[in-house]
Image (cartoon, coloured by chain):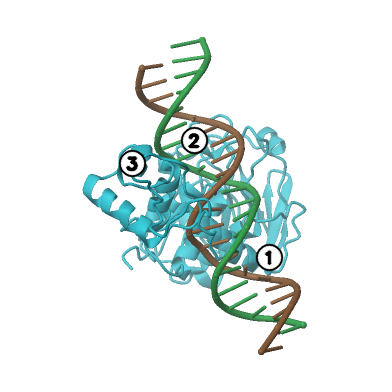
Chain colours: A cyan, B brown, C green
DNA sequence: AATTTCTCCAACCGCCTCTTC
DNA sequence: AGAAGAGGCGGTTGGAGAAAT
């Protein structure tokens, strides 16, 4: 499971210090318990400083980077060890659907978890699990390791929605003119939506909503989703039948801003949950929901250009998260 | 029981960004 | 301005243990 300690360094103390304290060669590979002790003791008494100083002053034959990694990923006292809870898994999937492989950003929303841990968890467990999901017919269906629309997104949204937690819209205009993330989730109850009740711009029997000033309009026509003339997909009581992701260009050209609502514009990631004040007790019974997709179209498009803090601030308030355990 | 294959994950590598001089 | 060093990040590796043959 681990790399062997670097055989080029003699001695069982793991440090490999010679008598005059000079460095012959930096140690690599598995950390010994003695090295761990040294690093822990040093960090607890001196705190974090320059990592190369930490390595040197703690008497470790390691490079600063190695010390940093060991501390962050393994020795930090606030780390939560053990298996991921289903709630954490949900959150990871959801965050990944938004952020892609930005493991550090994802880890920042999971107290006690490290980016490395989450990355490993994703690459082993979740990726495999998603592979076993019934495949979508999306022509762009891709491996979940990419930062593209994926089963992950779908599964994540679906699952959260089952728990009555559903991102209703995102403000795609944000602060950047080339925002990449265009994630839309439609909530089709067949009756009224919370959005409707809140006076948002919703049309027709089943309605559509537009997104702030940049707008992407997405509609529900019968069982089909559309954006302007594009058929996005269809749903059947929560079971996705088709999922078509239109090119960004067409969205940009075809979907014009109506900008008829401006509420929550500064709160781009609105989470509707059971405590939102509306009576949505039956929501989970008749919801058809589709994550239309997170589009990463073109390399110049970067989620990082968004105000991620704004975007994500509400995620940490997921009611089902137990960060204490 | 022995061998092979698979899985998981700690740690490394290389690149990028930021800061300092 | 730009070189150097440090920190941070995501991708990848490789080895121990588990599972399969």
Say left or right for A78 vs A135: left
What separation in Å lies between label 1 and label 3 (alpha carbons)? Answer: 55 Å
What's the chain of the residue with tag 2?
A: A
Q: Secondary structure at mark 2?
A: loop
Mark 3 neighbour density, 10 Å: few (under 14) some (14–19) many (20 or more): few
Which residue corresponds to mark 1?
A131
Q: Nearer the viewer, residue A11 or A221?
A: A11
Q: Secondary structure at mark 1?
A: helix
Q: Nearer the viewer, residue C20 or A257?
A: C20
**Which of marks 1 and 2 precedes in the sequence?**
1
Q: Position of residue A257 (x, y in %)?
A: 58, 34
Say left or right for B1 vs A303: right
Which residue corresponds to mark 3?
A20
Q: Which mark is residue A302?
A: none
* Total numbered circles: 3
What's the chain of the residue with tag 1?
A: A
Q: Is residue A180 visible?
A: yes
Closer mark to the observer between disc 2 and disc 3 = 3
Q: Quadrant of the C terminus of chain A?
A: bottom left
């Amino acid at each position: 499971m681990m790399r062997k300690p670097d055989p080029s360094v003699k001695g069982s103390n793991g440090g490999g210090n010679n008598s005059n304290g000079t460095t012959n060669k930096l140690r690599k590979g598995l950390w010994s318990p003695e090295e761990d002790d040294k690093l822990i003791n040093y960090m607890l008494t001196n705190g974090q400083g320059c990592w190369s100083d930490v390595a040197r002053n703690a008497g470790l034959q390691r490079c600063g980077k190695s010390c940093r990694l060991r501390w962050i990923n393994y020795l930090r006292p606030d780390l939560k060890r053990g298996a991921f809870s289903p709630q954490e898994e949900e959150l990871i999937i959801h965050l990944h659907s938004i952020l892609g492989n930005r493991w550090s950003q994802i880890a920042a929303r999971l107290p006690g978890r490290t980016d490395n841990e989450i990355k490993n968890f994703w690459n082993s467990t979740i990726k495999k699990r998603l592979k076993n999901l019934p495949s979508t017919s999306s022509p762009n269906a891709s491996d979940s390791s990419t930062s593209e629309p994926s089963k992950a997104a779908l599964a994540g949204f679906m699952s959260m929605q089952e728990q009555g937690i559903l991102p209703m819209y995102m403000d795609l205009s944000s602060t950047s003119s080339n925002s990449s993330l265009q994630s839309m989730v439609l909530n089709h109850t067949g009756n009224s939506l919370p959005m409707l009740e809140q006076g948002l711009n919703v049309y027709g029997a089943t309605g559509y909503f537009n997104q702030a000033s940049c707008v992407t309009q997405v509609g529900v026509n019968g069982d089909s989703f559309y954006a302007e003339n594009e058929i996005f997909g269809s749903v059947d009581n929560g079971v996705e039948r088709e999922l078509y992701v239109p090119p960004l260009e067409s969205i940009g050209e075809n979907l014009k801003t109506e900008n008829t609502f401006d509420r929550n514009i500064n709160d781009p990631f609105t989470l509707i949950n059971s405590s939102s004040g509306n009576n949505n007790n039956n929501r989970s019974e008749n919801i058809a929901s589709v994550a239309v997709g997170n589009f990463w179209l073109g390399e110049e498009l970067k989620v990082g250009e968004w105000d991620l803090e704004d975007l994500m601030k509400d995620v940490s308030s997921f009611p089902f998260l137990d960060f204490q355990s």
